[in-house]
Each structure stands twice: as C-alpha cells, then as structure tokens.
Image (cartoon, rainbow, N blue to C red):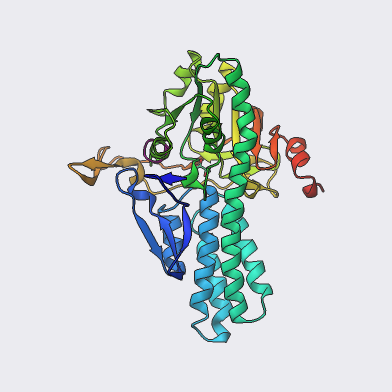
Amino acid sequence: MKVNGQPYRTIWLKPDNPEIVQIIDQRHLPHQFVIEDLKTVTQAAAAIKDMHVRGAPLIGATAAFGMYLAVLQAAKTSRDSFDDAVNAAAETLHATRPTAINLAWALERMNTGIAAADNIPAKIETARQLAVEIAEEEAEACRMIGEHGLDLIKEISEKKDGRPVNILTHCNAGWLACVDYGTATAPIYAAHDAGIPVHVWVDETRPRNQGARITAWELGQHGVPHTVIVDNVGGHLMQHRMVDMVIVGTDRTTYTGDVANKIGTYLKALAAKDNGVPFYVALPASTIDWQIRDGFEIPIEQRNADEVKIIQGLHDGEIKHVLLTPADSPAANYAFDVTPARLVDALITDRGVCPASEEGVLSLFPEKKG
Ligand code: MRU
C-alpha cells in the first residue's frame, strides 16, 4: 500500500545491505513515519514484544526475519554453538507474544528449513529465502482475502442504491498489521478501488488505540472515507441501522471457528448478533490453529497496566505521554478476547468464504481432515 504516494510493505530487507531488516516502527503513527533497522534477533524480538510491529501476520513475518538475523549472527560464532544459538533465538522469539498463532507457525517453518540445510552458508541462504517467501505468501493471502470479501460488500452495495456500505472494524487489521493489503481491510480496499462506495466506522480500540492511530491513518492514506468512534459506540450505531456489516481480523482462530481477536471484539459480535448485522472475520491460513478445538484454550496475552493508565498523543508538535488514571489505581490489561463461532457469520480466508465451523473450515482446507 502507499504512504504519501510511495508504495511500502511493512517489512523488507534493506536494499543496499540485505543483512539488515527494515520495519515501519508503528509506535510513532500517525504522527511520525519512522523506519527502523533491525540488525539482531534481540532487536527483532523487542520489536515484536514492544509492538514496533504488531498484528498477527506481521508478527509471524517479523519472527521469520528474526530467525534469518539469528542465523547470520550464529554463523559468526563457532560451529559447535551454532545450533544452540539458533535454538535459543527461536525460543526468545516464541516468548514475545502468546496469542497470535502466526508466530509459532512462522518459527516452525523457519526451524524446519534451517535444520534441513546442511552447511552454514546454505542455512543462511535458506533462512533468507524462507523469510522472504513467508512475507510474499502472506501478502498474496491478504490480496486473495480482498478478492473473496469483495463479493460480500458488493452484495450489500447492490441493495443500497449507491449509498455507501457502512463497515465497522475493530483494532487494526489493516496492511500495517500484515505485510500488505490487511485482512479485514483487504475487502474494503478492493471495494473502494472497484468504485463501490464504502465508509468505515473505526473503533478507537483502547488501550493502545490501534484503530484511532493506525487504521484511521492507513484508510486516510488510501482515500477511504472513515470515521473514528470510541469503543462503546458500535452497539448504538447498529441499533440505528448505521452499520451494514462488521469485518474484523483475528490473532488465532480454531479449526472449529472460535476467534481470538483484540479485546472488545466479542462485545461487537454480541451487538451485531442482537441487531442482525453480519459479522465477518478475515484471516489467512497461517492464523488457523489446527490443534485447539475450543477457543477458550487460546492463551490470552496480558500486557503492562501502564498501557491502560497512560495515554500517548501529540502536543505542541511532540509525542507526549499523559497519566489518565489516579496514579495508584491498579489497571488490568487483557489484550484479546474470544468470540465463539456461533456469533460469526462467516470466515473470509485466502481460499474463500466459509461458515465458522469445523465443517466450514475443513471444506476449504480438505488436506487437514483427520
Ligand atoms: O495487539 P495487536 O495490535 O497485535 O492486535 C492486533 C489485532 O488484534 C488484529 O486484529 C489481528 O492481529 C488481526 S491482524 C490482520
């Protein structure tokens, strides 16, 4: 997608030095556009944990590039300690964030590829190629989610006589959460680009405000009409028929269709069900957990209470942090919740749209049967 007219992805190898990985440091958006160099696996792990990068597909891609950096570093140690260094790096990356399954998915693919290469130069080349491949595949998967989701928006638009389709989204499941296009936003960009009038209600998404800061910024960069709302408005808008559909992303979806996504998603799904508003979840195959049957087994990340207590914003041209709560009040920071499959109208995947159920998911991924 474009930033000030220039095409970007969220992660790439530095063109004049492919031993450096570059990312957009999202902590500064929307006020500053900062590109960060990652030179070590420690920096890659910190970038994931401290949310310079975030969003399930991008967490996976960053872990993949982190393993490439780990292999480059390990090659500078002795042959004996090479494997230990690479294994330790995988563990460090794995421990960064617990909910997005894309992290474990990418690490497993990297570990298998690196282990199969039989000398150190081959391991370096395999790690580089695999990381690039994972990023490319995730971008293509999101493009396909856009193609499949476009039909759902088109269908609603045809009944609206040229009036915009109002889509509510939560958190940032946009291109900045992925490698390109986004998951929830991919159908929205596809519809906008096809000339279908759309308008997006952007949940601010406390505590880190990924909606207000990041989704609003990226929709604005692409010229998509949108309105930022506080997290509690969605139910009111749905009661007043001001939302035609909800599309959200997910950090982990069980093969039975239960969906873990940013905290607050469940309440939007409840409101959507009560008001007959279709509720869709967009995801690439890498976000499906093929082991867990019941969504309540998904590990839910709890983050630092300061994210709830302290707000970040622009003041006099500088990014400032402001204490919101009484200094001594404890705060709880559950980062994700689980929306049961029964509240999800359909999953929009890179292979097509399916019911949020075991039968539905397996109909698109028959190779996973049994
Ligand atoms: O805590 P974050 O910002 O990493 O959470 C991101 C989300 O919850 C997204 O909705 C999810 O990763 C879907 S990504 C396209």
Residue 101 visible to an observer of this rendering: no
In this view, which residue lies farthest toward the right? Answer: 370
Q: Is residue 157 visible?
A: yes
Q: Residue at x 59, y 38 (%)?
A: 146
Decide whether the magenta segment is chiefly helix, strand or loop: helix
Say left or right for 228 vs 329: right
In which quarter of the view is residue 204 placed?
top left
Q: Position of residue 348 (x, y in %)?
A: 64, 36
Range of magenta residues: 211-215
Residue 212 forms part of the magenta stretch: yes
Nearest the camera: 178 or 322? 178
Residue 209: image x %, image y %?
A: 38, 39
**Against 326, is 319 above or below?**
below
User: Which residue is at the front of the view, 307 or 68?
Assistant: 68
> Could you tell me which residue is drawn at 62 percent across and 33 percent down?
149
Count up the numbered dots. Answer: 0
- Residue 277 picture quarter: top right
**In the image, 108: left or right of 209?**
right
Residue at image point 52% right, 35% down:
189
Residue 138: percent from the left, percent from the top? 59, 51
Above or below, 50 against 361 in this view is below
- Vertical order, 165 against 303 (above or below): above
